[in-house]
Amino acid sequence: MIKVLYIDCCIRRELSRTRILAESFLKLIENNNVYKIEKLCLMDEPLHYFVDGFFEQRERLIGEGRFDHPRFRYSHQFQGADKIIIAAPFWDLSFPALLKVYIENLCVEGITFGCDETGTFGTCRADRLLYLTTRGDDLSDSPLEMGARYLEAMCVFFGIKRFDYIAADGMDLGLEAPQAILARAIQKASDLAVNF
């Protein structure tokens, strides 16, 4: 079985247009019996950003080589996935801060990346990361879009060779019905699902 980790950062939950796109993709691959999908809803997780004692605990545990501590569960889960899907809406030029906090918790030397005399290298097993998003404006070629760029760079850092993303752009411009824009993105997701 191919282990797929689905990371849900659709803050609006059932009202999220990004979640509609993600669930459409998941239904397509769920029909294929080669995938085992593990879902992680970030809104339900006790995620903490690094501050004071929480940061100090992390540094101490890493220094002691105690990578089996429960606080590293996100790193182990991410590192062990064969494929990864992230669903998050476009917020403040990238994505919700909750996703950044999650990524900060993933970055553990000795689990998701390593270092040697040549620099850092990724140690994650996944060969592919798919980012699904919806954006109110059309930012497909804009320097203001930082979410996809950031995640693509993180793929390099984690050693994930392929990065794809599908964005439903211009959802709030009023130039076209949002349902039509979302339908096109769902069709792109359907095409991609064939060889995911």
Image: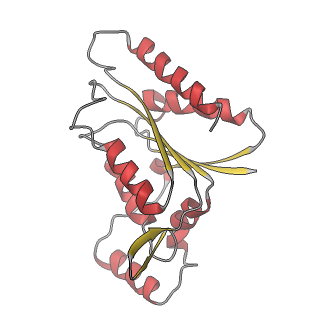
Give the quarter of the image for residue 107. Answer: bottom left
Identified at 45% across, 69% down, the residue is: 121
Compared to residue 115, the image places residue 190 above or below, namely: above
Which of 92/47 is in front? 92
Q: How many numbered discs sit on the rendered protein?
A: 0
- Left or right of residue 195: residue 17: left
Q: Indicate how the structure is coloured in the image.
A: secondary structure
Which of 159/189 is in front? 159
Taking the view exactly as shown, the residue that stands out farthest to the bottom is 64
* Residue 148 locus on image (x, y percent): 36, 42
Which of 47/153 is in front? 153
Give the quarter of the image for residue 12. Answer: top left
**From this viewpoint, is residue 61 visible?**
yes
Identified at 50% across, 77% down, the residue is: 110
* Residue 82 locus on image (x, y percent): 63, 54
Compared to residue 1, the image places residue 112 above or below, namely: below
Identified at 62% across, 38% down, the residue is: 196
Identified at 50% across, 71% down, the residue is: 71
Taking the view exactly as shown, the residue that stands out farthest to the front is 118
**From this viewpoint, is residue 16 visible?**
no
